[in-house]
Amino acid sequence: MTSLASATARPEWPGNWPHGPARSEIALAWFDSLPGLEPEEMIGRWRGRGLPTGHPLDGVLEQLGWYGKVFESADRVHPLLFQTRSGTLIPLDPRFMPVRVALRWSTLAKSGPARMAFRAVRSLLRSDQSAASLQAVNFRGKRSAAMIYARKPITDHFRRIDDEWLLGLMEMRGMERPYFFLLTWDENLRA
């Protein structure tokens, strides 16, 4: 496995993340080593993917067609942007996403029947209303951008890997350990 020193020195480390989960402690150490960023630096569309750490949510969003996040302004954020089979991107209202169910029964959440059910109801979950906001907060000893969900006890904290990559840490009230994800700048939508 890549050492912390070499992983943080090379911006390409997210693309070379080992197959299979790494320990949460390693991902947390990488997160803590990265610089913060201001909310205005996040404006635009970002492609997302989970960073496997053995968390129950690993792979759940990807199985459902998660594309990423759109930050239109500090007060207008779409945290859950999904891609349909035709390639259309649609923002969903996170308040209807059963996160606690996915945490408890993650294998079921990644199953074929769950994907089919989600596709069947996805259009009902669509919302063009902002579902989160961006703020600069102090977290784990650094000031950086955080996305605070409007109707869920969830906060996503961000750190900069380089000009194209961000490392995200999702914390939710009652969740034992954080969920990690990567965001890459979407070249198709420059702010």
Image (spheres, grey):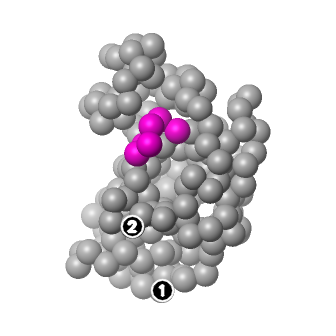
Q: How would you classify the magenta stretch by its main secondary structure?
A: loop
Give percent across and percent down for residue 157: 62, 45
Is the Cβ of the residue at disc 1 closer than 8 Å to that at disc 2?
A: no
Q: Which residues are magenta?
A: 160-165
Looking at the image, which residue sits at the far front? 191
Q: Identify whether 153 is placed above or below 84.
A: above
Membership of 117 in magenta stretch: no
Q: Is residue 114 visible?
A: no
Where, quadrant-wise, is the N terminus in this rendering?
top left
Looking at the image, which residue sits at the far right? 138
Q: Identify whether 144 is placed above or below 84.
A: above
Looking at the image, which residue sits at the far left? 86
Residue depicted at 55% across the width and 61% down the height: 43
Give percent across and percent down for residue 26: 49, 22
Can you tell which of label 1 and label 2 is closer to the viewer?
2
Which residue is more in the foreground, 46 or 107?
Answer: 46
Circle 1: residue type: Leu
Residue depicted at 44% across the width and 49% down the height: 183
Give percent across and percent down for residue 167: 50, 40
Gap between marks 1 and 2 measured at Cα: 26 Å
Residue depicted at 34% across the width and 59% down the height: 187
Q: Is residue 162 visible?
A: yes
Q: Quadrant of residue 52?
A: top left
Residue pointed to by mark 1: 124
User: In the rendering, which numbered label is found on residue 189?
Assistant: 2
Give the structural element (helix, strand or loop) at label 1: helix
Which residue is more in the foreground, 81 or 138?
Answer: 138
Give the structural element (helix, strand or loop) at label 2: loop
Q: Residues within 10 Å of mark 1 (few under 14, many from 20)?
A: few
